[in-house]
């Protein structure tokens, strides 16, 4: 999330948040190939989620993408079956409608939608393989400076045939450990929160701690995420921890 300012024009060069999202987009025509694998340890099973993500910027303020997750689970409970296969394919759309650039900093806001198709099996791996259609609509706002970055996301997830309708809020802080340069050569620390308020009264608060290395067109990252609060979450969906690791390459 570090930002570099160079004369005679601004060049914003940063790694994205690890478990969150960002409102800053790359140049028109860029393609981003990325993966963000997760080992999610639940009370009754452990899942390896390995998505292939492709993002494309057709216009300077528009991003479209597709996420194709592969799911492998290992049951630790006799009542839970293991599975391996395709998860729920996701289509992403983002539109940046506000941008305010100043010397050494920028503030931007995007509208975001995520459409999740029922291509996976029915499991307790929420958001990844639930075998039913869901949709998410939200906004992402972010402040990037040469010293720090702050990202916010708020949105509503709709699950017409299920019970995971919720309001989500994410808050992330990025701290660069090196002076900004161009081409990018940066190490960033991230401190990230995710708060899920389910419409039926359940609640979950997650915290993620991560580190990221960005070098030119390549970004490598890893994080650990664990629950701070879980109120009335069903036992099969209760989180113990997640180990997250990924990479991206900009074409």
Image (cartoon, helix red, strand yellow):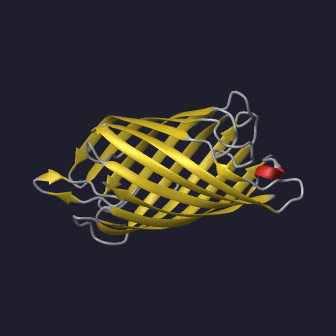
In this rendering, the answer to whether 248 lies above or below 63 is below
- The C terminus, quarter of image: bottom left
What is the x, y in percent for residue 113? Answer: 49, 34
Residue in front for this viewpoint, 126 or 166: 126
What is the x, y in percent for residue 82? Answer: 78, 56
Q: Residue at x 47, y 38 (%)?
A: 92
Residue at the top extreme, as displayed: 160
Instruction: Please identify the quarter of the rendering in which residue 215 is found.
Output: bottom left
Instruction: Please identify the quarter of the rendering in which residue 209 is found.
Output: bottom right
For the question of whether residue 18 can be seen, the reply is no
Residue in front for this viewpoint, 87 or 99: 87
For the question of whether residue 208 can be seen, the reply is yes
In this rendering, the answer to whether 247 lies above or below 115 is below
Residue in front for this viewpoint, 181 or 77: 77
Residue at the front extreme, as displayed: 85
- 17 relative position to 45: left or right: left
What is the x, y in percent for residue 163? Answer: 74, 35
Q: Residue at x 37, y 51 (%)?
A: 32
What is the x, y in percent for residue 193? Answer: 57, 54
Q: Residue at x 47, y 50 (%)?
A: 53
- The N terminus, quarter of image: bottom left
Residue at the bottom extreme, as displayed: 178
């Amino acid at each position: 999330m570090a930002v570099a300012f160079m004369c005679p024009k601004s060049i914003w060069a940063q790694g994205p948040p690890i478990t969150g999202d960002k409102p800053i987009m790359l140049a028109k025509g860029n393609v981003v190939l990325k993966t963000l694998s997760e080992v999610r340890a639940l009370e009754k099973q452990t899942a390896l989620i390995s998505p292939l993500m492709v993002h494309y910027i057709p216009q300077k303020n528009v991003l479209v993408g597709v996420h194709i997750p592969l799911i492998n689970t290992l049951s630790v409970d006799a009542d839970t079956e293991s599975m391996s296969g395709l998860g729920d394919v996701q289509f992403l759309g983002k539109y940046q409608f506000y941008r305010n650039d100043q010397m050494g900093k920028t503030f931007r806001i995007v509208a975001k939608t995520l459409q999740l198709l029922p291509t996976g099996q029915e499991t307790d791996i929420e958001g990844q393989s639930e075998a039913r259609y869901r949709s998410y609509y939200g906004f992402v706002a972010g402040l990037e400076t040469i010293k720090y970055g702050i990202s916010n996301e708020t949105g509503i997830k709709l699950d017409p045939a299920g019970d995971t309708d919720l309001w989500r809020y994410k808050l992330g802080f990025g701290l660069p450990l090196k002076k900004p340069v161009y081409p990018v050569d940066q190490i960033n620390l991230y401190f990230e929160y995710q708060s899920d308020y389910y419409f039926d009264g359940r609640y979950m608060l997650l915290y993620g701690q991560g580190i990221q290395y960005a070098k030119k067109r390549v970004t490598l990252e890893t994080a650990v995420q664990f629950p701070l609060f879980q109120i009335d979450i069903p036992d099969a969906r209760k989180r113990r921890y997640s180990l997250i690791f990924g990479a991206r390459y900009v074409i």
